[in-house]
Structures are given as structure tokens and as C-alpha cells.
Amino acid sequence: METIRLDLENYRNLLKEYLVTKDETALYRAEQFSKLSMQHNVSPEEIVHVHIEALKELYPDLPEAVDDSLNFLLEAMISYGLAYQEFTTLRQKQSELKSEISVAARMQETLLSTVKPDIRGLEIGAISVAANQMSGDYYHFVADKDDDTLGIAIADVIGKGIPAALAMSMIKYSMDSFPESQRNPSAILENLNRVVERNVDPSMFITMFYGLYNPNNETFSYASAGHEPGFYYHSRKNEFEEIEARGLVLGATEQAKYKQYERKIKKDDCIILLTDGVTECRLGDRFIERDEILEVIQTYIDLPAQEAVEQVYKHFERLQDFHFRDDFTLIIIRKNV
């Protein structure tokens, strides 16, 4: 601060030098003074006050109007300094929050990571892209090596950000803790519903679809907790059929029951699961119709499953001008034997 005090005293000489000589060197020194003042948290009104004092020493007979205008400027700088200080503090807090969210996003990616398993007779494609740093979507594969079954979960939190990420982490680790005897879709959802109802804020609901593929009898069992309906693709007829399954969102009531459905899966047919980030894509001012979504999926359905989901995502990304309003998750499972 001693350097600043000295510079404030020299400001008068610097101002006088410039007024007399109009030398740009003085302007450069004034610029350096401003930078040094910022580093030492010298307020704008303090600089203006010194400027006014220096000007009055140089010109004692300043017109009254000029004197009043300088006082007006000083008052304005006092308000400006307070507002700028508040802005700087908020910007610093915002930067710290952004850094924390970035760390949380990386933790979420690690905690919720899942690996596409190698299941006999199945080809799997999956893509999930967050609209913002933190995703409210989640998908997970649970492979049982003893009987070759594959559990498939896809979920969406009604709510975003860090609370949604924490809720999803709880869902994943709850699922992993369930005994093998409770791997049926209806049992999974009923157990998760109790976990959510007891541990998640009442304002936050979670939709989920859980399916179980059994290669031994080529059946797909499934249940839904208010999740976006998926589709079944009949390859021979080149037609889509909506997968109908009803049930309350997780956490709505502790006693919720979930009906389990079952269907046979034929060779080359596909199961398509998604979140509302897919079905609520916009084209201009309107939402895309489900038939339009199926037309896009149908365009790429004959590609390898992973390539298909990636191409569908890129198609909708272009359609949305590369800015999704919601998280986008799409899974395609094809029976290939």
C-alpha cells in the first residue's frame, strides 16, 4: 500500500504534466497507475477524489458548475465502486461454483459409468449426452454370467443438476445391492421405489424403465415407472410397435406396484429405449412428432447398433442447431441370432 500512497501523491504531478505537455507518455503512466490500483483494491472514487484535489490545486478558480460536476462524478463513482465490488465478488463465486460443478460432473461420469456387456445373441448400441454439465439421464446394464441374462435400466430424473446426479448415484448402487433373487423388473422397480420415496426430496421424481433379456427362452421381461414408452422394431415387416407399460414414477408413494410384461424377441428385431430428450426435440417452434422420430430411427436401423444410435443423435443434433434443451439418451438392442 505504501507504493499506492506514493503514486497517489505523484498523481497530481502526472496530471499537471499531461495538461501542460499533452505528452502521451503521461497517459501510459496513468494506464500503469490504473492497473496497479486495481491490484491493490484502490476504489474508483478514491482515484476520482485525488483527481479532483489535484485539479483544484492546479486551478483554484474552477467555475462553480465544473466543481459541482466533479462532485457529481465522485458520488457516481462511489455507487459504481460498490456495484463493481459486488459484481466482482459474484463473478468469483460463480467461477468457484463452475469449478465445483465441473468436478461433480466428472464424479458423476465415474460413478454412473456402465460397460456394454457381451451377451450371447445380442448387439447393443447406447448413447447418452447431457444437455448441460450435469446429466439427469441414466442407463445401466446388469449382466449375469451364470445364466447370460441382461438387465437394462434407463431412467430420467425430474430435476437437474447436482441433486439429480446424487439421486442417480443412489439408484445405481441400490440396484447393485439387490440380491439375484430380486432381479425381475417388477421387483427391481418396487424396491427402488421404496428407496426413492424414503431418501429423495418429495419434489424430485424419477422415471425408469427396466427390462430383463433371457437368451435361454428368448424373452424380454419389462416394467415401467412412468418412463417414456420405447419401441419394438419388427424387422421382417419393417414396422415399429410402441412398448406399452404403465406404472407410477418412482417416489410417488411407498406402496406402488409395477406390472411386469413379457414378449418373445425374434431374430433381427430390435428393442429401442429412450428418454424424453429424444421425443421432445424441437423443429422450430414445435415438438417433433413420434412418427417423425421413428422415420429417423428407421433410416439408420439396419446399421450396427452402436453406429445407429450415434447417427440418430447426430441427426437430431443438427436439427436442434447443436443445442439440446434436455439430456439425450438412446439405446438399441438387436437380437442377431
Image (cartoon, rainbow, N blue to C red):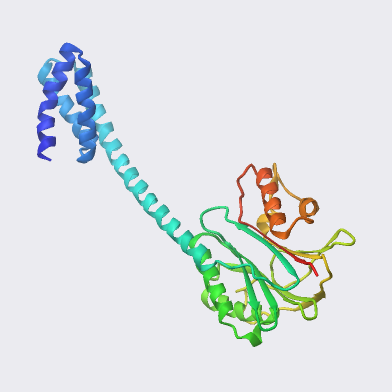
Q: As drawn, which residue projects farthest toward the top?
A: 21
Residue 294: x and y, percent? 79, 54
Residue 230: x and y, percent? 75, 64
Q: How many numbered marks are there?
A: 0
Q: Based on the displayed image, in which of its 4 quarters is residue 112 positioned?
A: bottom right
Q: As drawn, which residue projects farthest toward the bottom?
A: 181
In the image, taking residue 43 as reference, residue 303 lies left or right, namely right
Q: Nearer the viewer, residue 110 or 46?
A: 110
Residue 266: x and y, percent? 84, 70
Residue 163 visible in the current orientation: no
Look at the picture and state if 186 lies above or below 17. below
Please report the residue visible at 44 percent of the width from the left and 56 percent of the height from the top: 102
Residue 153 visible in the current orientation: yes
- Quarter of the figure with the N terminus: top left
Q: Based on the displayed image, in which of its 4 quarters is residue 249 positioned?
A: bottom right
Look at the picture and state if 34 lies above or below 207. above
Look at the picture and state if 120 lies above or below 35. below
Please report the residue visible at 57 percent of the width from the left and 53 percent of the height from the top: 131
- Quarter of the figure with the C terminus: bottom right
In the image, taking residue 180 as reference, residue 67 lies left or right, namely left
Q: Nearer the viewer, residue 46 or 147?
A: 147
In the image, taking residue 200 as reference, residue 322 lies left or right, namely right
Please report the residue visible at 50 percent of the width from the left and 65 percent of the height from the top: 110
In the image, taking residue 214 as reference, residue 254 lies left or right, namely left
Residue 39: x and y, percent? 22, 39
Q: Based on the displayed image, in which of its 4 quarters is residue 214 positioned?
A: bottom right
